[in-house]
Amino acid sequence: MPAQHRIIIDTDPGQDDAVAILLALASPEIEVLGITAVAGNVPLALTEKNARKVCELAGRPDMKVFAGAIRPLVRKLETAEYVHGKTGLDGPELPEPTMPLQDQHAVDFIIKTLMKEKQGTVTLCPLGALTNIALALIREPRIASRVKEIVLMGGGFFEGGNVTPAAEFNIYVDPHAADVVFRSRIPIVMMPLDVTHKALTSPARLAAFRKMGSRVGIATAEMLEFFERFDGEKYGTDGGPLHDPCVIAYLLKPNLFKGRKVNVAIEIGSELTMGMTVVDWWGVTKRPKNATVMRDIDADGFFALLVERLGRL
Ligand code: BDR
Ligand code: CA
């Protein structure tokens, strides 16, 4: 049976990106056409390497990984080693990858795939800054009408920001790219901090990964233990938010999430609120509804899905 979802994952791994990739590769409903790396949590040379490490961990050295933008469109790259460690994937000892990086540039791969595949059949899943997606839209605007939808992790509204009081990291790193994407008219599903801050790890949830006893289960527990250290301290919670896997979980079980179709505009003018996702939750403007913004998650259902799927690898 053909997969229900054919996707390109655009990512900056990152421990939570890694879990999202594992979830996608473990799920028969999803065909991953390729993984495109972008600079974000750590520089591009590390994110593309980490993406390959994760594919090998999943037993998928055949996966195609492409390197994309080395820096944001306008602003200087800001990375987040303080969260993810100096490799971006600190926690487990993962071997250096032996699978190749593809020669083709990530942006060319995105464009070529969308132009070649049947219209409305490919979903883009950005888990980092939106630089590669914006560059693809700028270079080949016809792709906008060919994408099925974009399901992304980024932004925050009721919850505020996590890198400035107003902005979430992925949007803040490249707000100009986010502006291009949110104006593209491609249907967008947005997983903001409002959702991901409810998808918290806990000792019991981490123990479930460790109990699998497999390489994937143990590496996942080690990654998340490292990752939650920073966020647990920052938010005073027992665990850390598992942001990026929400994107893939939505494809598999959309009913885990609740949200509303609204207008989202990106702040690119003010330094104080740069990268803020301005969500018109109450419909007080006439601006077009360009995104479904999620606000709630069934966190137990989400973790049950993760454990069940990662247990297959
Ligand atoms: C986002 O920023 C990154 O550090 C995470 O991987 C996630 O994509 C959360 O703000
Ligand atoms: Ca990420």
Image: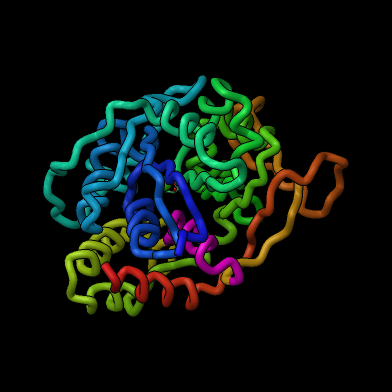
Residue 248 located within the stretch drawn in magenta? yes
| 306 shown above or below 23 | below
In front: 162, or 77? 77
Residue 50 in the image, given as x and y percentages of width and height? 25, 44
Asked if residue 166 lies left or right of residue 82, the reply is: right
Q: Residue at x 42, y 60 (%)?
A: 242
Residue 300 in the image, given as x and y percentages of width and height? 48, 77
Residue 174 in the image, given as x and y percentages of width and height? 51, 31
Quarter-of-image position of residue 91: bottom left
* Residue 261 in sight in this render: yes
Q: Dividing the image into 4 quarters, which one contains the C terminus?
A: bottom left
* Residue 132 in sight in this render: no
In front: 71, or 225? 71
Asked if residue 47 lies left or right of residue 273, the reply is: left
Q: Residue at x 29, y 73 (%)?
A: 311
Residue 268 located within the stretch drawn in magenta? no
In front: 80, or 129? 129
Quarter-of-image position of residue 68: top left
Q: Residue at x 21, y 57 (%)?
A: 59
Looking at the rendering, the stretch of residues picked out in magenta corresponds to: 241-255
